[in-house]
Image: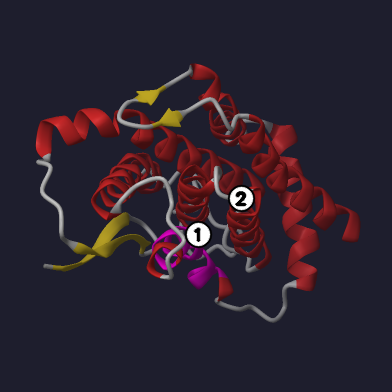
Amino acid sequence: MNNIILLLVLFLFQISLGQQAQKDTITTTKTTKFKYEALVIPTALIGYGVLGLNSDRLQGWDKTINTQFSKQGKHKGMVDEYLQYTPALSVYALNAIGIEGKHRFKERTVILGTAAIIAGVPVSVLKNQRIVIRPNGKNAFSFPSGHTALAFLGAEFLHQEYKDVSVWYSISGYAVATATGIFRIYNNNHWFSDVVAGAGIGIFATKIAYWVYPLIEKTFFSEAEGNAGMVLPYYNGQEIGLTVSVIW
C-alpha cells in the first residue's frame, strides 16, 4: 500500500519538475512566444487518460490503486473541495500582500478566465457523455476529474506568474494540485486515469490561455486601468465555471 501511494505521489509530482524543465518554453511579455514542446506533458497526460478508457491493462491498474486506497480511505473528508481552488487563489493572495507576479490584475484575470473556459468545455462535454462510472458507483460522471483539472489549471497559473520569482511557488502549487488528485482517489470519487487526464487538461488549458492572451487583449480590451478584484474558476461536480468579484 505504501509503495502504491509513493508511486502515485512521484508520478503526479513529477509533473511539477517537468514544468520547471520547460521554464523558458513560454515567455510572456507584451507578446507570448509559444513552442509546441510546452504541450508535450499535458498532451501525454490526457492521452494516458483516454487510453485508459479502453485499455484492460490501465483499467486493471486503476482498480488495483482504487482497491488499496479504499481500504485506507474509510474516513472520507472534503479537503479536496478546498484544495482545488488554492493554487489559483494564491496568485491573488500573493499580489494582495505585495509579492507581484508577471501580470497585473486585468491581465491575469483574463488569462485565468480564458483557461477556465478552455478546460471547462472538454471536462463538461466528456462528463456528460457518461463514459465511466465512479468507483463509488454514484454516477457515470467520473471521466475526467474536474477537481483535478481545476487544481492543475491553478498550479500552472501560479507557475507562470511566479516562476521567475521563486521556484518554490511552482513546486508548492503543483504539490497542492497533486494532493487534490490523490484525495479524489482516496475519497473513492475517481480512478487514477480520471485524475491523470484532468491534470493534463488543466495544464494544457492554462498554457493555451497564456499563448492567446495577447490576441484577446488586442481584440476585446482597452488599456484602461484602475479596477481591482479577483476571478476564480469553480467546479460544481459536472461543470467548470467562473466567479468574478470586481471593485470599481
* Residue shown at 48% from the left, 42% from the top: 160
- Position of 240 relative to 12 (above/below): below
Kind of residue at disc 1: Pro
> Farthest top residue?
36
The x and y percentages for residue 78 are 55, 76
Q: CA distance from mark 2 to mark 1?
A: 15 Å
Q: Earlier in the sequence, mark 2 or mark 1?
A: 1
What residue type is disc 2 on? Ser
The residue that mark 2 highlights is 166
Say if residue 140 shows up in the picture: no
Q: Is residue 82 magenta?
A: yes
Q: Does residue 197 appear to the left or right of 115 in the view shown?
A: right
| Residue 1 or residue 161, whichever sits in front | 161
Q: Is residue 22 above or below residue 7?
A: above
Say left or right for 181 vs 156.
right
Q: Position of residue 148 (x, y in %)?
A: 52, 53
Residue found 28% across the figure and 52% down from its top = 109
Q: Residues within 10 Å of mark 1 (few under 14, many from 20)?
A: many
Residue name at image x 60 percent, y 43 percent: 196
Q: Residue at x 60, y 49 (%)?
A: 170
User: Where 101 falls versus 31 (above or below)?
Assistant: below
> Residue 34 at what x, y percent from top left?
43, 21
Q: Residue furthest bottom?
A: 75
Which range is magenta? 80-93
Which element type, helix, strand or loop, lies under badge 2?
loop
User: Residue 87, which numbered label?
Assistant: 1
